[in-house]
Amino acid sequence: STVPERSGVALSFCRRPSFIATFEGLTHRCQNGTQPLIHIEAHGDKTKGLKIGGEYLAWSELIKLVTPLNVLTENNCGLILASCFGVEIFKLLPINKPCPFNFIIAPSAEVKAGEIRDEMTSFYKELMSSGNFNLALAHIGQSFVFFESRGYFLDNAFKYFNNQLAGRPAKALKEKLITDVRRSFQKAEIDIKLLREEARRIIFDPEEIYTLHAKTFLHGECSGQLIPDSIISFSSATT
């Protein structure tokens, strides 16, 4: 597919405060319509995260920096981590929160600097010359993993709901639904009893709760194509 027009941003800093400040600057650009493709080159540690200068930035901290950009762009922020163990960042993603990026390309383990340089060079040359993202991806070797938010949601939704729609998790989910509705209406006089009944109904309707989570994780997107047969079967099994 052809990549939408984006503003490329390469991040490589020797100090952690400067690195963090750059994301704050990107927030203003995203508010003005920029859809960034962020390229980060830094040493990556599987458990510690990115090494920025003499300090580490945890993978969870990087998620917190990127998420506001993806919210502002409505799931149109791309991230390329030219860092060892970059895939660790999307092992931390729950599907009940907004996804931090539309897609990410990152190494699955430790990778030699020369390999990163060669494959990234081929990737960008193809992307710049053809504008075709799929053709550019063909230049990425097996050391790199491509994550796409829509596919990730589809792969993980059934397992998530199977674990969350019973017992304590279901009760916590119901309370969250109530809280979210109250916050959206911003009225104290909402009938809590009716809200609880509605929350319970949603929890016992997997198709509806699937749609609700899809809209959250994918920043508003949820077409009929996103509802797989497994969810419909699960709905039939729970009624």
Image: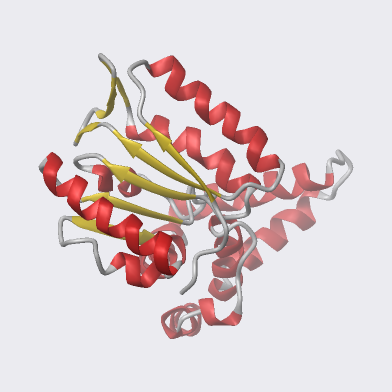
130 vs 36, left or right, is left
Q: Is residue 111 visible?
A: no
Q: Is residue 236 visible?
A: yes
Q: Nearer the viewer, residue 3 or 181?
A: 3
Q: Give residue 200's position: percent from left, percent from top.
A: 63, 62
39 vs 199, left or right, is left
The tally of labels here is 0
Q: Which residue, as the protein is rendered here, is positioned at the far front?
A: 129
Question: Against 198, is 84 above or below?
Answer: above
The image quadrant of residue 51 is: top left
222 vs 167, left or right, is right
Q: Give residue 233's position: percent from left, percent from top.
A: 44, 85
Q: Residue at x 86, y 38 (%)?
A: 188
Q: Nearer the viewer, residue 173 or 145?
A: 145
Q: Give residue 109's position: percent from left, percent from top.
A: 14, 46
Q: Give residue 215's position: percent from left, percent from top.
A: 61, 62
Q: Residue at x 47, y 62 (%)?
A: 165
Specify how the rendered protein is coloured.
Answer: secondary structure
Q: Residue at x 52, y 78 (%)?
A: 227
Question: Against 218, is 87 above or below?
Answer: above
